[in-house]
Image: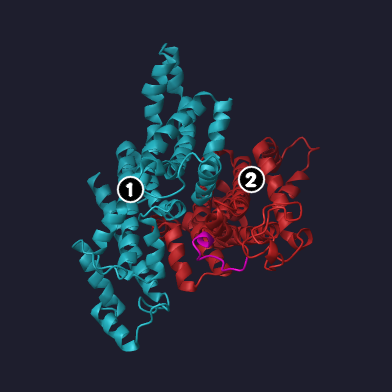
Chain colours: A red, B cyan
Amino acid sequence: MTTEAIAIAPTTHRQRSPMWFAWRRFTGNKAAIIAGVVLGILILMAIFAPVITPVSPEAQSFLTEALAFPSAQHWFGVDNLGRDFYTRIVYGSRVSLTIGFTAAVFSVVIGIPLGALAGYFGGKTDWFIMRVIELFSVVPPLLAAMLLGALTRGGYFTIILIAALFGWVNVCLLVRAQIKAFREKEFVRAAQALGASPWYIIRRHLIPNSISPIIVGFVLAIPLAMMLEASLSFLGIGVPPPTATWGQMISEGIDFMFFYWHLAVFPTIALAITVLATTLFGDGLRDALDPTLKGR
Amino acid sequence: MLGYILRRLVSVAFTFIVVSLIIFFMMHAIPGGPFDANDMPVSAAVREKLMANLGLDQPLWVQYTRYMWGVLHFDFGVPYQSPGESVTQLLSRAWLPSLVLGGLGVLIGAPLGILLGMAAALNRNTWIDYFASTLATLGLTIPVFVTSMLLILVFAVWLNWLPASGWGKPERWILPIIAYALIPLATYARYTRSAMLDTLNRQFVTVLRAKGLSERRIVFQHVLRNSAIPLVTVFLPMFIGTATGSIFVEAMFRVPGLGAYFVSSIQTRDYPLEMALMLMITFMYCIAYLLSDIVYALINPRIRVGGAE
């Protein structure tokens, strides 16, 4: 991850890079550090899921013990179809994390060029892109996602696309603001005077200068996508069964809540921890990279 | 000022029409129709007759203009899932539980959030501040169905203090109202805290202190009033947000409100109801943003002079 690269920033020189200060600010934020560690553990858990779980998540290996409470053998109990619940929770992190990260990547891929165009050219281009963003602001993402989900019959990639469709707006606004601020700087003026094309200036000068808001936008898009996925899966129009997802497990857990509490508690807590860790980590990065945005 | 309002009005009306077009065509693009359900199949002839009666055999743009023309006259059509009444009747019946729970949630959560935010800003870096920040982060990040689930588990299943679900008796309202209230509480705690901290650092506060004004008067008469702008503008969108929140809260607490219709109208291709719900939410957001733009322009002259920005 990027934080590793920042860690090796030169500390022996008297002249400190902005990244060094960012790192100092980040490490000063205890909540963000803890969140980062938790997120790291979750990512490792998702990657090594087959290694740390006894059975496959779809295997109904424990039918005779269906709905068993947590025990030494089944840490989180067994679900109504005889599947080890701990295994399903661990595999659920794969869905949440991959959808979160991939959707964030797509959001950035859509958001950067549009934000750059709007910020650099201004005028009609900016007006048009801002009107498109206005369209997105009056439709609640969830309702549109429900429609789109029905239109495309749900599924893994559809959810990623839907999340990206609503995730790019934030990235676009952050990039636009940054590029608007840099457009009038002397070095950009100089580049224009030397005959550099707008495309070259955006690519060579403006986007590298927007790297902080881009990272911030990326990290903040992850929990939003995760929440969208969980919400859609909860409503039964997200990732279809038998794939283990937390939203789906929570919605099934409600039916068993009064007698078999473990089916409701574990996915709820897993989702809460993951979203919380990602958000706190993102907030920490944002405060470290761009102190002026703090608390927004 | 009038010119600015007119410009915003045109822009908002345009947004509304574009959104209605997109939603209408997307809705009809979803494969399958209202009478394709597998549990009660109808013959092809009957289906054709039904479709013709409802005008569904017409080209889409005819259907769209017809529907929108009806909307202009406050006629939202007849829901396919309960043909005995109009969409307006159905919605006004389902609206009440959602409005009571969501409204009470916002009305309880917002003032509490403001108080918490103020307490946090005035006692910076004390346990009150940390408590407020923690609560705000939890409320803003954790999906509402997760908090609802935790509330049910703790207060209904384990402690057995309150009923978990239903509608009717006021004690059944408590848990859903808490679930709704958490979001405004968190939002307002966060906004109030940062707005107050911004204002407290301004020079005029130092002058007021030097003048010998009591801290209480500084806070309530000057700082709070100067921090109020962002608080006013987030209120309406947040209030409308409870409508989409109702999908989850009402499903969790089994409340017979608006929420379930959002999902069922999409799943059963109940076009008039679906369109009415979508238009209603979009319309309310449009009005909310228009109002907050106007309020902003009234407060801050730079915006209305700045023009089309």
Expressed as whole percent of the image width and height from the top left, the position of residue A200 reads: 59, 61
Q: Residue at x 39, y 59 (%)?
A: B260
Residue A50 against residue B216 in the figure, above or below = below
| Residue furthest left as drawn | B73
Categorize mark 2 by other alpha carbons within 10 Å: few (<14), some (14-19), many (20+): many
Residue B34 against residue A245 in the figure, above or below = below
Occupied quadrant, residue A79:
bottom right
Q: Is residue B16 left or right of residue A237?
A: left
Residue position for label 1: B99
Q: Secondary structure at mark 1?
A: helix
Magenta residues (range): A232-243
State which mark lies toward you, 2 or 1: 1
| Residue furthest right as drawn | A12
Letter of the chain that mark 2 sits on in the rendering:
A
Q: Residue at x 62, y 42 (%)?
A: A284
Letter of the chain that mark 1 sits on in the rendering:
B
Q: Looking at the image, which is closer to me, A233 or A144?
A: A233
Q: How far apart are the two marked residues, 2 and 1, measured between alpha carbons?
A: 36 Å
Expressed as whole percent of the image width and height from the top left, the position of residue B52 reads: 26, 82
Occupied quadrant, residue A16:
top right
Q: Looking at the image, which is closer to me, A12 or B119?
A: B119
Q: Residue at x 24, y 49 (%)?
A: B3
- Which quarter of the rendering shows the N terminus of chain B? top left
Q: Is residue B245 left or right of residue A54?
A: left
Q: Are marks 2 and 1 on the same chain?
A: no
Q: Looking at the image, which is closer to me, B291 or B55?
A: B55
Categorize mark 1 by other alpha carbons within 10 Å: few (<14), some (14-19), many (20+): some
Expressed as whole percent of the image width and height from the top left, the position of residue B299 reads: 32, 36
Examine the residues drawn in magenta and state their main secondary structure: loop
Judge whether residue B19 is colored magenta.
Answer: no
Residue position for label 2: A281
Q: Secondary structure at mark 2?
A: helix
